[in-house]
Image (cartoon, helix red, strand yellow):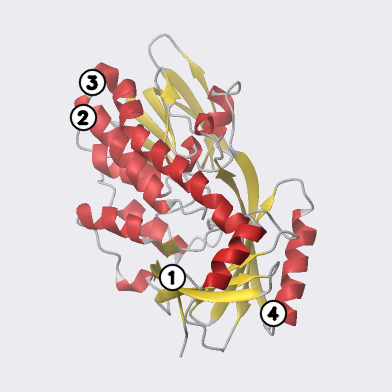
Amino acid sequence: MFDIAIIGAGPSGSMLARLIANKYKVLLIDKRDLSNESNKKSIVKCCGGLLAPDAQNIMARLGLGVPKDILVSPQLFTVRTMDFNNNIERFYQRFYLNMNREGFDRWLADQIPDNVDKRFNSLFKTFRKLDDSYEIKYTHNSKSYSEKARIIVGADGGNSIIRKTAFKEEKFPSTYISIQEWFENTNSMPYFTAIFDESITDFYSWIIPKDKYIVIGSALKARDMANNKFESLKDKLRNHGFNLDNKVKREGAFIYRPTSLKQVLIGKENIVLIGEAAGAISPSSAEGFSYAFKSALNLADSLEDGGKDFLNSYKRKMNKIKFNIFLKNLKSPAMYNPIIRNKIMKSGIQSMKII
């Protein structure tokens, strides 16, 4: 019998496992083989791999520093904003750590103490309620297994199975498909590029340099001709002078975009959600690392302080995250309404000139 089963070993799941390992018997399940770097079948998370200042702050508070072999060139101090609707371009100062996302997830998994029972390369299937616990079923190497746990934590990201199974009647955030393609690139590009174009998406697209590559990505509405719109984005970038001849790989994932606080779910009984599975992700930028870390910290503190009342404690602690998401939604019109964005970018407020 495990005290806690964490489904998903991304930033939120790995962080939580690290924080509670000394007090609880923990089971951690993830479909990726995060302990074996030679496994070429490991599934890479579709992600820009940029660590924003809020996430850096939390890691600093935890005494964690990203190893240099996880960082990629260049480190980014500038956001280039391209507004295709209004044909305006501006530069803004921002500070990101540019990382290899797969390497970052493996490093976070390495920080988990050995007493956590890690079941990597395992696919979670389902769970059912027992008298005082839950039975969890998963597969590993085509074989089926089951374990029991008193608490289940859904840390399985956008399109969360735990959320869809346990909270069918609750409201879900808008679901987008994140598509990324990697291309060989020899030109210097020392900034993260954010692209706004309503004909492509009501969210945004991006270009991120990664060593000798550039990553072209977009957050596209699910079931809205996502592939066609991604191809249209690439055509427009070619017309802007980007060389996209040598494609290396393609990645994809579901992401949530919470537009209402009712879409941010905390949990019920002994089933809890953290990170993006809870809807804890920025609705304005899709930044998720800081929300993943904060929700993991909140739950770890609640399990420490709340005892049997941990869920109510966790709900109270998550109010700050919910308020932050509320503020991000207030900010969104300035970014995603073409008329407002046009006025702000034309004014040049907070922008800078590149010499």
**First-in-chain label (2 vs 1):** 2
- Mark 3–mark 2 distance (CA, rounded to whole Å): 7 Å
Which element type, helix, strand or loop, lies under badge 3?
helix
Marks 2, 1: nearer the viewer: 1
- Mark 1–mark 3 distance (CA, rounded to whole Å): 47 Å
Residues under numbered marks 4 and 1 in contact, where contact means CB atoms less than 8 Å apart? no
- Mark 2–mark 1 distance (CA, rounded to whole Å): 43 Å
Q: Nearer the viewer, residue 102 or 191?
A: 191
Residue corresponding to mark 3: 307
Is residue 158 placed above or below 50 in the rendered structure? above
Residue corresponding to mark 2: 304
Q: Which residue is drawn at 77% across and 74% down?
A: 235
Q: State which quarter of the image contains the N terminus.
A: top left
Is residue 148 placed above or below 351 in the rendered structure? above
- Sort mark 2 into few (<14), some (14-19) or many (20+) by Cα contacts within 10 Å: few
Which element type, helix, strand or loop, lies under badge 4?
loop
Residue 24 visible in the current orientation: no
Residue 198 visible in the current orientation: yes
Residue 353 drawn at (x, y percent): 47, 83
- The mark tally for this picture is 4
Q: Residue at x 76, y 58 (%)?
A: 227
Is residue 211 placed above or below 316 in the rendered structure? below
Direction from residue 38 to residue 200 in the image, left or right: right
Is residue 57 placed above or below 127 in the rendered structure? below
Residue corresponding to mark 4: 244
